[in-house]
Image: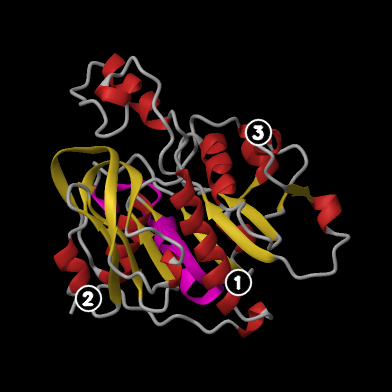
Amino acid sequence: MPIKIPEDLPARSVLEGESIFVMTTRRAETQDIRPVRLVILNLMPTKIATETQLMRCLSNSPIQAEIDLLQTSSHTAGNTSPEHLASFYKTFDEIRDDRYDGMIITGAPVEHLDFEDVDYWPELTRILDWTLTNVYSTFHICWGAQAGLYYHYGVRKYPLASKCFGVYWHDVLAPASPLFRGFDDAFPAPHSRHTEVRPDDIMACPDLELLATSPEAGVHVCARRGLRQVFVSGHGEYDADTLAQEYARDRDRGLDIEVPVGYFPGDDPARVPRMTWRAHASLLYSNWLNNVVYQDTPYHLEDLEPLPSRRGRSD
């Protein structure tokens, strides 16, 4: 996909080095088409790495996509330079009057906190409300998925006895869903989390569908019927070495961290991990973009139908 990005965004050189087609803003302006408008709310501390990972996943499409990067104004990012944020990121106040075909809300390393204790929770809830009227389909990742399920549907998160950490196999429960077009019956995806949402809570909500689960990792993909809200508990966007970096970080801090499941060859952290999930991750994102966002969003975004709020409903 020709992703439309600023010429000096760090992700550009990385993606071009991988032969991924990116298009500068200047070139995109010469094409007489309406690009798909996407916004990424990046809650991760490693913002540049996350930008690159997500844009890589969105690259498998002939559609031109115009991407805005969004940060919270109520929380100061400590691991990304102020210059990068000022150059490439917008705040909610700058986009609140805009409309988008699709939105991605990332995870965040705050799952040990109750949702209401997260310092930017009030701002995030305003953004979640805004998605109902200003975004056609919103794709939530990991903690972002837990936050969306809790805020919109009252679905709780539960602490795990031990961290769900590694690459797990998942069963496709809804092979006819547009999200899983071209998928195998089972597929791998990375997880890295200390909490979970439970299948029974998803199935108890009539607005939600359970789409992919793992015997070990639990719920992986669920969605609002019609796919205007998608919730993914894993991290298909991760690079080959992301789990290795997390493992080394926690080990060096003296934390009680197990070797990631199904990740290192022979479960040996001294060996180089193999990328086994990129094809299905790319397919999930491209299916969302091609079969949901592009196919169903009105050509004129001002004609976007609001999505009724189901906040707190679990019956």
What residue sits right under mark 2 in the picture?
A: 205
Q: Using residue 229 as the reference point, say whether residue 211 is left or right of it.
A: left
Image spot of residue 206 (x, y percent): 24, 80
Q: Residue furthest right?
A: 30
Q: Tell me the tag on residue 294.
A: 1
Pointer 1 local density, CA inside 10 Å: few below 14, some 14–19, many at least 20: many
Image spot of residue 103 (x, y percent): 53, 61
- Name the quarter where the C terminus is drawn: bottom left
Q: What amino acid type is highlighted by mark number 1?
A: Tyr
Tell me the residue at 49%/82% (across/down).
306
Residue nearest the observer in this picture, 122 or 59: 59
Residue nearest the observer in this picture, 153 or 299: 299
- Helix, strand or loop at disc 2? loop
Q: What amino acid type is highlighted by mark number 3?
A: Val
Q: Using residue 25 as the reference point, say whether residue 114 is left or right of it.
A: left
Tell me the residue at 64%/68% (across/down).
98
What residue sits right under mark 3 in the picture?
A: 14
Give the magenta part as a residue range. Answer: 114-140
